[in-house]
Amino acid sequence: MGSSFKDELSIPNTPADKAGKVIEKEFKAMQPAGAQVKVAFKAPKNETLESAEVQQKIAGVLEEIKKDSAVDSVAAPMQLQNLSEDKTIGYAVVTYKVKAEKVTEASKDKILDSIETTRDAGIQTELSGGDVTFSDSETSGMTEIVGVLVAFVVLAFTFVSFLVAGLPILTAIIGLAIGMLGIMIGTNYVEIQSVSLSLAAMLGLAVGIDYALFIINRFRQQLAQGDSVPESVAIATGTAGSAVIFAGLTVIIGLLGLSVTKIPFLTAMGVSAAFTVLAAVLVSVIILPAILGLVGHKIAPSKQNRFLQKMTGAGKKHAGSNKWGEFVIRRPLIVTIFSIGLLAVISIPFFHMNLGLPSDGTTKSTETTERRAYDLLTEAYGEGFHASLMVVAKSDEATAETQNAMNTIAKELGNLPDVKSVTPAIPGPSGKIHMISITPKAGPDDTKTKDLVKAIRDKSNQTEKKNEVELMVTGTAAMNIDIVQKLSDALPVFAALIVGLAYVLLVLVFRSLLVPLKAVLGFLLSLGATLGAVVFFVQDGHFQNIFGFPAAGPILAFLPVILIGILFGLAMDYEVFLVSKMREVYTHTGDPKRAIVEGMRESGRVVVAAGLIMMSVFIGFMLAPDTIIKSIGMALTFGVFFDAFIVRMTIVPAVMILMGKSAWYLPKWLDKILPNIDVEGESIIHRVENKSEKIYKQNS
C-alpha cells in the first residue's frame, strides 16, 4: 500500500487554468521535465556573487546536487543572468525528472546536505520549492498528542476515573487509525491534498472522543440505577448510540455538502474527513459496546474518591449545570442582549475579511528555508517576483502583422498600473499564439495584483475588437485569484444550503418552528463571531507572536466553507443533545420553564464536557508549524467555544424562557404529516419500563 498526497490547490476550467493548458500545449518544448526548485544565494558581506571564489563554491554545490539521479538539470545564477542590481543575490534552478509529489525524501535530503557547503562558506543559501516542501510542514504527531493529553485530563475530571477517561481515547484512536488508513489507500485512486489528512485527523479524533463519551456516560448511568452490565450496554447503545449515529450523520452531511461547491479539492477534503467521522461512529456503536461489556462494573460510578468528586462537582447532582441554568433563567433578557451583543462585536472584523491562498511569505516561519528564500528573492527582485503573470495572446492568423500587433499589445500591457516589467511577445511554433511575461509591482496577495489581472482580462475586449487577439492570463497569482473567486462564489450557495438543511432537520427532530429558527440564527451568530475572531488574529495580525503566525496575511480561501460544513454538524449535535431533553420534559409536563431547567441539568454537563474535549483537540492543532493547519485549528476552537458555551448553553435557554410555550408551536396540519424521529432512542426506555412493569405485576 502506498500513498501520495498533493500540496497543490487547483480548480479545473478556470480562466487561468485554461490559459495554462494553452501554454503547455503550444510551448511544450519550454515546459520543465518535472518539479523545479530555486536555490537562492546571497554573497557574504562586502562581496558579490560575481566573485571568483563565491562562484567556485556555488558551482561545487550545484555539481553535488546534479549527482542525484532524480535531477534532470541544474542552471546556475550566472547562466540564467538573474543577479540582483547590487550583484549580491541570485538563484539557481534545479529541475527534477518527476512531479513535485514524486520527489522523494532522499532527494530532499541530498539538496539540503549539498547546500551546507556554501552555508559554511558564509554564503546564505536557501531553497524555494513551490510544491516541493523542505521544511517540516507535518505536525509530526505532536498536535494530536497535545490534544489527546488535554482531552484525557478533561475526561478524568468529568468521570472521576482514569480508566473511564482512557476508554474514549482508545476507541477514538482506533477509529482514527481506520480513517487514516482508508484515506491513504484512497490517494492511490483520487487526488487528495495533504491538508485533508490533517483536517480528517483533527475532526476524527475530536468526534471519536465525544461520541464515546456520550455512550460511556449513559452506560454508567444505567449501572448506577442498578441495571446489569448486559442491560446497561444494550440501553446505552440503543439510546446514546442512536444519538451518536444522528450526530455523526449531521457532521457527515455537512462535510459531504462541500461537494455542491463543485471544487474537486474541497470535495476530497470533505469526503476524507467524512470517512474518519464514519469510522468514529462505527467504532463507537460496534467496538465500544464490546469493550464496555468486558470492563463491566470496573467503570461504574464510585463514591470513594471524595477529593475528585469535590473538584468536579460529581458529588453534587449536576450542580454546575444547574447553577448556570438557574442564573440564565433568572435574567433571560439581560443574558440574551449581552450574549448577542458580545458575538456581534466579535463579528465586526468579519466584514473586512480578505480571502487568499497560502504563500511562503505568509504561511512559513522565518525558521524555515522556504521563508528565508522568499525574503531573499523579495529583497532582490521585489514582491512582484512571487506574482509573475503569463499572458497568452491568441490570434487566428500567423503573419508579420500578427507579430507586430503582439509587440504593440506587450507595450500597452507594460503601461498598465502596477506593472514593474514586461517581456516582448514570444511566438509559439504555430505563430498564432504568443506568450508575454509580466512582473507586477505588488505581491501575490495584494489587491493591486488582483486589479492588474482584472485589467489585463478587461483589455482582452479591446484587443479582440482592434487586433482580433484574445488575451488570457495565467501564473500562480492568477490561478490563486481564480480559485479565491470560485470559492467566494460558492460560499453563499453552500451557506444557504446548510442553513436550510439545518432548519428542516431540526423541525423534524423538535416538532417546532421557532426552536429550529432560534438554533439556525444561533449557528449564524457563532459562525460570524468565529470568522471575526480569525480575521482579527490572522489577517489583522493581532497577537500573532502568541499564536505563532509568522506574518499577517489573508484568510485561507477555503476556510469559511470548511468551517460552515464542520460547525454545522457540531452545532446541530449540541442543539439536539441539549434541547431534546427539554422537549421530552415539556411533552410530559407542559411547563416550559421546568423543561429548560431539567434539560440544562441533565444534558448541560455532557455538552460542556464535549465542547471542552473538542476544543482541547483543536487547540493541539494550533501548535502545528504549518499555518494552514494552525488557522483551521484556531477557527474550529473558536467555533466550538462560541457555539457550545455562548450560543447553546447561554442564548438558547434564555431565548426559550422568553418565548415560553410559543417556542414549541407547530401547526396541527404539519404535526400530522411530520414523521416521529426518536433521536435518543427514548422509546427503548419506555418499552423496557413497560416490560418491567408487566413482569412486576405478574410476579405480584
Image (tube, grey):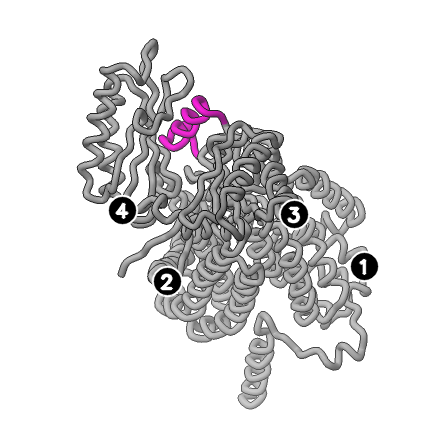
Side (left or right) of 92 relative to 585: left
How far, Cα to Cα, is label 1 from label 4? 68 Å
Magenta span includes 519: no
Q: Amino acid at mark 2?
A: Gly
Residue at 20%, 26% in the rendered image: 60
Q: Which quadrant of the structure image shows residue 521?
A: bottom right
> Alpha-carbon neighbours of circle 2 within 10 Å: few (<14), some, or many (≥20)?
some
Farthest-out residue, top = 46
The quadrant of the image that shows the C terminus is bottom right
Q: Amino acid at mark 1?
A: Met
> Alpha-carbon neighbours of circle 3 within 10 Å: few (<14), some, or many (≥20)?
few
The disc label shown at residue 77, or none: none
How far, Cα to Cα, is label 2 from label 1? 49 Å
Mark 3 or 4, nearer chain start: 4
Q: Which residue is mark 3?
A: 465
Question: Where is residue 259 shown, x and y percent of the image?
Answer: 54, 62
Pick whichever, 629 or 522, lies toward us: 629
Q: Which residues are magenta?
A: 364-382
Side (left or right) of 498 relative to 180: right
Q: Which residue is mark 2?
A: 186
Q: Which residue is mark 4?
A: 97
Question: Where is residue 223 shown, x and y percent of the image?
Answer: 47, 67
Secondary structure beneath dot 1 equals: helix
Question: Where is residue 580 shown, x and y percent of the image?
Answer: 65, 66
Residue 609 visible at all: no
